[in-house]
Image: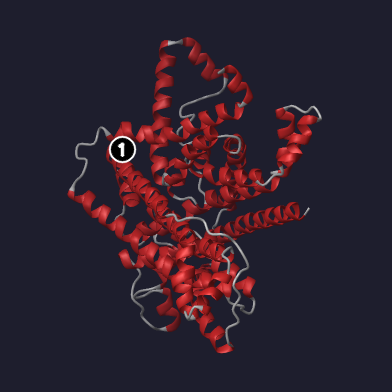
Amino acid sequence: MTRWLSRYPSYLLSAVIAVLALAPIAVLYYLAKGAEVYFSEETWRILKNTLLLTATTVVGSIVIGVPLAFLTAYCKLPLQRLWVIALATPLAMPSYLGAFTFYAAFGKGGELEKLIGLTLPRMEGLAGATVVMTLYSYPFVFLTTRAALRGLDGNIVNAARTLGLSLPGSLWRVVLPRVRNGIAAGSLLVALYTLSDFGTPAIMQLDTFTRAIFVEYNAFGLDRAALFSLQLIFLVVVVLVAEFCFRSVRENSGHCLSLQPSRAGVAFSLIPVAGIVALAIGLPLLIFGIWLKREGAGDFDQIIAWNSLKVSLIAAGVAVIVALPVAYAATIGKVGRFLERIVYLGYGVPGIVMGTALVYLGLRAEAEIYKASEENPEVTQFLEKWGLEEPFLYQTLALLVIAYVLRFLPLAVGTIRATLEKIDGNMVHAARTLGAGRSEVFLRVTMPLAMRGIVAGAALVFLETMRELPATLLLRPNEYETLTTEIWLVYEAGYFGRAAIPGLLLVLFSAIGLAIMLAGERRAEKLLLHQEES
């Protein structure tokens, strides 16, 4: 056993991290035992709303994302790269930001009525939440389906056409069934995103599990909040199992199909594309621009932007450090891959659930330590020596960073593992034959080659941390506001115009994080291509 651990120290580190990832779920189970009613009429109503919102959003994302993937993967369009980036850009904008502007723009007295004089239906309830969630989550389906289409051998379409099928018939009956893995992968991400989103249902006034958890937490009903959280996690597990069962056999890659539509066909195709981009990106930017022109920068405190940047950078740095042993372990054996799967549970736990669990954990840990200090002078001396005054964990930056890392660690693990798997093993073996130890090879050979994946993983964690709202609301230190909490406070106070600066800054920072992530992935692809050619 000792030899095994000394040979694979990353297994030991991964096991510790996996246990920490499971800790919030164990805490929620302990808390939920205090709930008096496990399933009530209210629970049925919340469950119905949550399932309906998830189902309609997934269907809407497939309806939008799959045709767009076909269009941009197979058809030669003018400025094709620009359209692909524009269609993926809604990923850089949190859905609650879109919900905020849609809520303010539509309806009687809305910003669009003031601008064009036409009263449009109000965006709220299930319909409003579905529209907003679909507009900001369809890129998951679009990107995964497009990647599957680009990797599919286009000769199967030519073969189907020689057997008498039309082009639309070939795409429907031959191509579509072969890319269902890509569609299922994107739909999984859409479903998980919808289940975990708090801001959009709250702004659209739709009672889902995330909104109910937040209400119960604010009403000091920790046991019911924990019970709702466990029920939400059960839905997440059901979605993960369903996606696994839907997978098909992987298709062989080949020459990508290329179609040249007529000018009229191109124009007809780009009209809905432009409409989607205008709604998802143009409308929020227009509303923020109107508010900025009307109210100016106001008394926006720049420290709020710095707080968001600081905590996101810290979380990204800590996440990649913690992710390295997990990703490395996943590449060297089955035990590592099993531990990696456990860590992935953290991403399935919604932010508001993670926040609820860590609030209890922080309060309980402090209470136990101070109880011990009353009975043991050495504990008191230790606390005084390190300047630990109550509270030293609850509502501190450290606990907030822990929540971010546990929640978004899988993103860094996945990105780094993908890069580690592409490294030429002969380079590592050459270093070992020259006398370098395992740790030296890892630091001097593996780490530099994996640096692009590390940067991309850090950018991804930075991007998600910057956008995270519910965990930040529950765990942030007193008077420590970030861009997301500032937008939420402005929404609750009804001073919508003051959201212009934090909203635009949030979009800007998110876009930078997305650009760095995409650049890292593109460079990794070029590196892989270079290795294959050499």
Q: Residue furthest right?
A: 434
Q: Residue at x 44, y 15 (%)?
A: 373
- In the image, residue 43 lies at what x, y percent? 23, 49
Between residue 171 and residue 51, name the one nearer to us: 171
Q: Which residue is mark 1?
A: 222
Q: Residue furthest bottom?
A: 264
Quarter holding residue 172: bottom left
Residue 224 visible at all: yes
Q: Is residue 111 above or below residue 27?
A: below
Check the image and tell me how it is coloured. Answer: secondary structure
Q: Residue at x 40, y 79 (%)?
A: 113
Q: Is residue 109 above or below residue 268?
A: above
Q: Is residue 283 above or below residue 247?
A: below
Between residue 422 and residue 219, name the one nearer to us: 422
- In the image, residue 173 lies at what x, y percent? 44, 71
* Location of the N terminus (image quadrant): top right
Give the amino acid at mark 1: Leu
Left/right of residue 481 with respect to residue 426 in the rendered view:
left
Residue 282 visible at all: no
Q: Residue furthest front?
A: 163
Q: Residue at x 51, y 42 (%)?
A: 404
- In the image, residue 144 lies at what x, y percent? 52, 60
Q: Residues within 10 Å of mark 1 (few under 14, many from 20)?
A: many
Quarter holding residue 63: bottom left
Left/right of residue 434 with respect to residue 327 in the rendered view:
right
Quarter holding residue 111: bottom left
- In the image, residue 506 lies at what x, y percent? 55, 58
| SS type, badge 1 | helix
Q: Is residue 158 above or below residue 339?
A: below
- How many circles with numbers are drawn on the protein? 1
Left/right of residue 34 with respect to residue 507 in the rendered view:
left
